[in-house]
Amino acid sequence: MTNSLRPYGRRRTPLPPAQPPDAGAVQPRPPQSKPRSTQQNKQRDAFFDNAKYLAIVLVAIGHAWEPLKGDSRVLEAAYTVVYSFHMPAFIIISGFFSRSFDMRPSRLKRLITGVAVPYILFETAYPLFKRVVDHDPGQEVSLLDPWYLTWFLVALFLWRVTTPVWKLVRHPLPLALVIAMLASMSPEIGDDLDLQRVLQFLPYFVLGLCMKPEHFHMVRRRSVRILAVPVFALALAFGWWAVPRMATAWFYHRDAAQELGAPWWSGPVMTLAMFGCSLLLTACFFAWVPRRHMWFTALGAGTLYGYLLHGFLVKAGDYRGWYEHTWLHQPAGEIFVTVLAAAVVTLLCTKPVQRVFRFAMEPKMEWAFKRDAAEPARERHTSEERTAEREKAGV
């Protein structure tokens, strides 16, 4: 892609200015080929928005399958395959878009308002929801014990805060893998802040930090899309074989090996094995993600809304016994639940829903922060540099 900061064609002699500048004067910078407003409103990459939307649909479908999978070996095999790559794919994208994170006040403010505050609100809302809907007055509210879906917000906060460290060390991915392996055999870590998941999913975030746009282009070739078909077929066959032989809890990454009734050494082995399998299936998933603008592309900007809100409906169905209907445990019922879950999470990612819940997901909170007079100038400079890098990379 041609760099927009470089003039097109041969260099021509500029027209003389109205008043000749002094010989020692510094010449003004050449005008940018695009207005600043155009650069700031540059179209998002459809591939990443498509990938985020499809990943969050798979997350919702997996949660909807959970109460039904015990009655169908085929459904449980599909469940294990989906769980082996849907969160890794989402986390890799989160890491990729966290590459520019630093301890700048504006970045920290967005981290607090976009991750920490939603965690506090939803970590409070979910237990209160259980009290009311499930008639469970004993359900406590604890900010140290992530409830259901909120673990991802804790993890994202901690991962992003440590981003400068991962950008500093020489071999970040091997180090992250070692940390995940050590966590998988350390039940002493406990459940506070769901640190087992934070540490065991850490390599996927660090991998995203290390990736460049050309890495995503590699898996978007036609040959990779064709190879993805037999790979997923083999994964489903292996999942069907593994259903009675392997605990599904391995895919949650929330327990040490000893807590799953396995010897300590199996933790590091399973960490490496599942990391390799997850990367393979994630690459196949990315190969199938459309590169062009689709009807659902715009929904990729609202995936966190769909992620946090669909949990209320899944839990309501569990509390109120919606899954107890016999016909839902038959093939037609399982298909119905799958389609319904995809439709609901799609609705929750739309703009109207975002406007209603923006107070909880993206609060402004200007009253809580000091004003930095120099920050707008720094943001403009950073935006211009990032735009030039993307144009040079062809993104």
Image (spheres, rainbow, N blue to C red):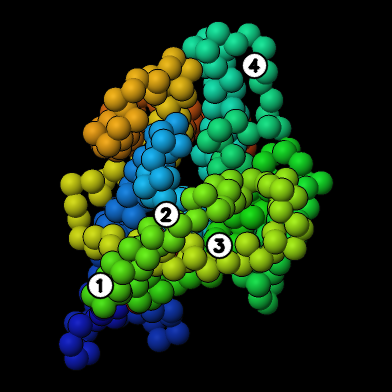
Where is mark 2, residue-wise? 240
Q: Position of residue 52 (x, y in %)?
A: 37, 51
- State which tag comes first along the sequence, 4 or 2: 4
Helix, strand or loop under label 4: loop
State whether residue 9 is above or below residue 257.
Answer: below
Where is mark 4, residue-wise? 139
Choose mark 4 or mark 3, whichever is in front: 3
Where is mark 3, residue-wise? 274
Q: Residue drawn 64% across and 49% down?
A: 198
- The foreground one among 217 and 256 is 256
Where is mark 1, residue-wise? 226
Q: CA distance from mark 4 to mark 1?
A: 49 Å
Compared across the picture, whether 265 is left or right of 297 comes to: right
Quarter in which the C terminus is drawn: bottom left
- State which tag comes first along the sequence, 2 or 1: 1
Circles 2, 1 touching at the beta carbon (< 8 Å)? no
Would residue 213 be visible to someone looking at this image? yes
Q: CA distance from mark 4 to mark 3?
A: 34 Å
Compared across the picture, whether 334 is left or right of 190 comes to: left
Q: Position of residue 63 (x, y in %)?
A: 43, 37
- State which tag comes first along the sequence, 4 or 3: 4
Helix, strand or loop under label 3: helix
Amino acid on which the number 1 mark rests in the picture: Ile
* Disc 1 residue crowd, few under 14, some 14–19, many 20+, Cα 10 Å: few
Q: Residue drawn 77% across and 58% down?
A: 264
